[in-house]
Amino acid sequence: MYNYNLHTHTLLSDGQLLPSEVAVRYMAAGYKAIAITDHTDYSNIKSMAKAVLEFCRRWPKNLPIKVLSGVELTHLPPEQFKPLAHDARRLGIKVIIAHGETTVEPVVKDTNRLALLADIDILAHPGLISDEDTLLAKKRGVFLEITSRAGHADTNAHVIKQARKFGAKLILNNDSHAPQDIIAPEELANLGIQAGLSKEELERIYADVTGFLKLKEGR
């Protein structure tokens, strides 16, 4: 079962719920691990990292869901991805997401490429990602996101096709902002299949994300 989601938002940015409620709702839905990845830029990187790290440090270890610290570097001038990713990592953040070139929002040209050159883990909703950038994601070991979020999900089939062509890694995420965004793991997996993933590819994604989480939990 695909039961991880590494892209969530809380009241720390534009989500509707506290981190604790996000975690409890994902736990109730059957997830084993999530990352709190609120929107970040130079205005809030230090305060955001402090808040999410404190929350994760105090999350009870005996509960059946693990919560990892994260950020989503969002709508940056592309040259800022590298220094901000470095800052986030230095501050102790485990999961770094870059807001990719979705087709439903104004995103600065070359965002995908310069984000992939930074120390990120996931390129969220990368839109109509090019051959060159998909190959760069493969070389850098960055996950390309398949998302359940309306609008961003319009290019899921293209992202799957590109990842398959070049052997890039994929990840399924909810990109949740509100309670209704927290869908069951089975529904998230089915969304990936509807977008074009085979069951074998879904199993590979599950294995890749499991290995990634083990690495992050060991840091």
Image (cartoon, grey):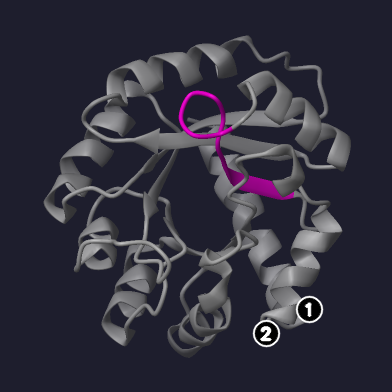
* Badge 2 vs badge 1, beta-carbon distance below 8 Å: no
Residue 120: x percent and y percent? 35, 49
Q: Which residues are magenta?
A: 4-15
Residue 139: x percent and y percent? 33, 70
Q: Which residue occupies the extreme left position in the image?
A: 79
**Mark 1 is on which residue type?**
Lys
Residue 4: x percent and y percent? 70, 48
Instruction: Report the front residue among 127 and 178.
Output: 178
Residue name at image x 19 percent, y 68 percent = 109
* Vertical position of residue 136 compared to residue 83: above or below: below
Which callout, 2 or 1, points to the residue nearer the camera? 2
Q: Is residue 9 magenta?
A: yes
Residue name at image x 29 percent, y 19 percent = 46
* Vertical position of residue 1 compared to residue 56: above or below: below
Q: Is residue 191 left or right of residue 39?
A: right
Q: Residues within 10 Å of mark 2 (few under 14, many from 20)?
A: some
Q: CA distance from mark 2 to mark 1?
A: 10 Å
* Vertical position of residue 164 compared to residue 153: above or below: below
- Name the residue beneath numbered marker 1: 199
Label 2: state its secondary structure: loop
Label 1: state its secondary structure: helix
* Vertical position of residue 171 compared to residue 174: above or below: below
Where residue 192 sits, quadrant-wise, is bottom right
Residue name at image x 80 percent, y 17 percent = 62
- Name the residue beneath numbered marker 2: 196
Q: Which mark is residue 130?
A: none
**Mark 2 is on which residue type?**
Gly
Residue 21: x percent and y percent? 72, 23
Where residue 201 sits, quadrant-wise, is bottom right
Q: Quadrant of the N terminus?
A: bottom right
Residue name at image x 32 percent, y 82 percent = 130
